[in-house]
Image (tube, helix red, strand yellow):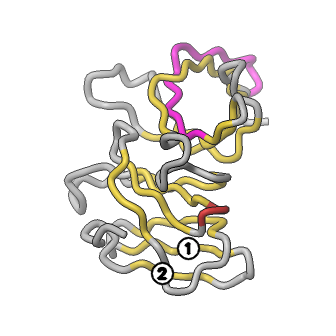
Amino acid sequence: MIREIQLESDIELPLHAVEVPPPSTVSDSAGQYIVSHTGDGVWWVGVNVRENDSNDGNNNTTVMAENKLSYSGAPGSDRRLAWPCHVAVSTNSDVNKDNFVFVADNYNDRIVVLNSDLEFVRHIKLDKTYRVRRLYLDEENQRLYVGLKDGNVGRVDNVFSHQNN
């Protein structure tokens, strides 16, 4: 084991987590994790902030986390998440002035784009979508590669200027 993260007790099923750099106002020892999960029967994407680390001497780190921001979409709205199974985060400010969170919204066959405060920005629909499963963000070339359930890979070009769908 490399790192153990103790999440909030209401997180029932974490699906994916990505460590992101802390904002400049936070000390270097702190970090943030974007976690896609379910809790109370609702699908969420949340930011968990490292509060303290402890190392057991064997390079295993326990991270205490507190949920600071979250997004799920309003019940009954077209922004509601359904099995947000994978997350990609933009962090290269040289390429993109805004840091976006891309969420593979599997059962809705789309990618949900959130800003760094986890507020809704837009949806991205592919021409042919069959259960979005994995995301890989190539920031330098402004491309988002999308792994689909059927084994195919889609690609979204100019992902930072992509129109709302």
Please state which of residues 66 and 110 is positioned toward the viewer in this rendering: 110
- Check residue 48 for magenta coloring: yes
Q: Position of residue 155 (x, y in %)?
A: 48, 81
Tell me, for residue 32, which label it has, or none: none
Left or right of 62 on screen, residue 126: left
Vertical comparison of 102 with 2: above or below: below
Q: How far apart are marks 1 and 2 (CA)?
A: 6 Å
Query: Residue tagged by mark 1?
Result: 146
Quick one: SS at disc 1?
A: strand
Q: Are marks 1 and 2 in contact (CB under 8 Å)?
A: yes
Count of numbered labels shown in the rendering: 2
Residue picked out by circle 2: 155
**For the stretch drawn in magenta, what is the main secondary structure?**
strand
Q: Which amino acid lies under the numbered mark 2 shown in the image of this protein? A: Arg
Q: Which of 14 and 82 is in front in this view?
A: 82
Say which of 110 and 97 sits in front.
110
Residue at horizontal 36 percent and vertical 66 percent from the top: 139
The answer to if 118 sits in the magenta stretch is: no
Up the image or down, 41 lies above or below 155; here it is above
Name the spot of residue 100 as percent of width and height, x first: 36, 52
Residue type marked 1: Val
The residue segment tinted magenta is 44-59
Find residue 55 and report its image quarter: top right
Instruction: Name the image quarter holding the N terminus.
Output: top right
Choose between 102 and 137: the one closer to the eye. Answer: 102
Q: Residue 102, how many percent across, how many down?
A: 46, 56
Q: Is 156 left or right of 147, judged from the image as shown?
A: left
Name which residue lies at 38% across and 25% down. Answer: 28
Q: Is mark 2 on a helix, strand or loop?
A: strand
- In the displayed structure, does residue 95 sit left or right of residue 118? left
Please say if 104 is above or below 42: below
